[in-house]
Amino acid sequence: MGRRMKHTDIGDIPADWKLQTFEETFRVLSNNTLSRENLNNSDGAVRNIHYGDILTKFTEVLNCNEEDIPYLNDLSLITASTQLLQDGDIVIADTAEDETVGKTIEVRNLGNGKLVAGLHTIPCRVKKGKFAPGWLGYYMNSNIYHDQIIPFITGIKVSSISKTAIAETMILVPPIDEQERIIETLMQIERLIKKEKVIIDKFKSFKSGCLTKMFPRDGATTPEIRCSEYTDAWEQRKLGEICDFINGDRSSNYPSASDFQENGIPFIGSDSLGTTLIDKNKMRFITQEKYSHMNGIKIQNEDILYTLRGAGFGKCSIADFSEGTVASSLVGIRCKRDILAPKFLVQWFSSSDAECEKQKAVNGSTAQNISVEDMKAYSLKLPKINEQEKIYEYLFSIDNLITLHQRKYYKFQCVKSGLISMLISINNQSH
């Protein structure tokens, strides 16, 4: 016999499950507006949740015992009104460059540690409802909840949501035993995700070691490891001498969240940039008509796409398709092929030399960013084209292994994202 159901604004749900508004469920806490330059990763008395970490680093349930959460440099910078977080609190990222705005974390295993919510966040504390540990983190990142947020997203170049806008979104409250069963299933998927993450991190660590030895270091003109047939010293060049730079679109024709669709012309944001290769699982698309009216870079095959600012600052990948465009936070880099192979350059961007050049150029008080002119001044050492090819072929073989496991990782993430909807359906058919 099927379970008795009731119709709600978010669809049919079991009759004994409750719905309540965001405003009924939560009390909004105060946050601070401190930028990255006010944080450090080594030590301090109070840790700080930055919106960029919510978007790119933290999972739905923030295990404070395991995650690297930045510390505040100076406690005097936070106001007396800033409230300390506790287990069960949620923190929402209210700003992003895409529809990831609204991503939420649930704070767990804080213990005696002190934690505050920082720039572009909405911290909240439950005032009504009984929730199993992890339920709010998983539910508020599910399609069921996030689809409610999409109509309230504002902005063109930067997406945002407000406390007022989300006040009427609906929070689903199943009986506590069902919450626990659903969470246990989600945690099984989570364990598979973590396993893939460990493999990915091992390959990345191996590649990092290769990069250290395959590019010249500390003023040297040759690398520690190279093929025996190459003996020439590497040549010092400026990036602006051997590349052309094309900005992303910043006009009124820039697409909004409602312009994206399941197929069409690729629109690349920083979230699509992977380990040298674009993550096609995360690509978004616009219509041919929208594409024709955009004024920014029209991608060519083997263009390098680099993130100049925002949560994905410094990420870059190589395009392996011949048509598309990019977000305003990205720049296209087009190599002069007789001097510089694009696949070599994208590997160089992962090297310690590239990181040093980036850090010299970093500016901005609220977020890390660099300008195109800064990038043109980057200094890099180049071997001849033939040696460049040998280097990138080897490094790309490692990238392919990383990409393989990243795809598995992403598939598990997709399963988890849609799993609450599926589990609700399963629960509907039981009992």
Image: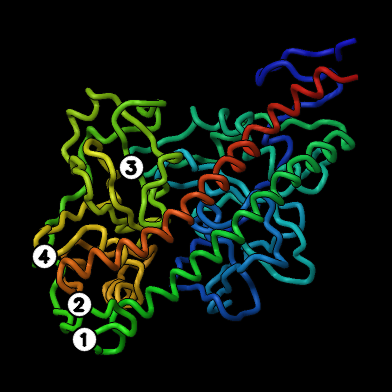
Instruction: Compare marks 2 and 1 and give the one earlier in the sequence.
Output: 1
Question: Along the line of sight, which residue is nearer the eye, 95 or 344?
Answer: 344
Spatial CA span between label 1 and label 3: 36 Å
- Whether residue 90 appears in this view of the structure is no
Marks 3 and 1: in contact by CB < 8 Å? no
Marks 1 and 2: in contact by CB < 8 Å? yes
Spatial CA span between label 2 and label 3: 29 Å
Spatial CA span between label 3 and label 4: 27 Å
Q: Which residue is mark 2?
A: 381
The label number, if any, that marks residue 268 in the structure image: 3
Q: Secondary structure at mark 2?
A: strand
Instruction: Tell me: 247 left or right of 130.
Output: left
Q: Secondary structure at mark 4?
A: loop
Q: Quadrant of residue 322?
A: top left
Q: Which residue is mark 4?
A: 339
Instruction: Compare marks 4 and 2 and give the one earlier in the sequence.
Output: 4
Tell me the kind of residue under disc 1: Thr
Rendering coords of residue 198 (x, y %): 61, 61
Instruction: Compare marks 3 and 4 and give the one earlier in the sequence.
Output: 3
- Whether residue 195 appears in this view of the structure is yes
Q: Quadrant of residue 241?
A: bottom left
Q: Secondary structure at mark 1?
A: loop
The label number, if any, that marks residue 243 in the structure image: none
Please report the residue visible at 80 percent of the width from the left and 39 percent of the height from the top: 128
Instruction: Tell me: 361 left or right of 38.
Output: left
Q: Which residue is mark 1?
A: 221
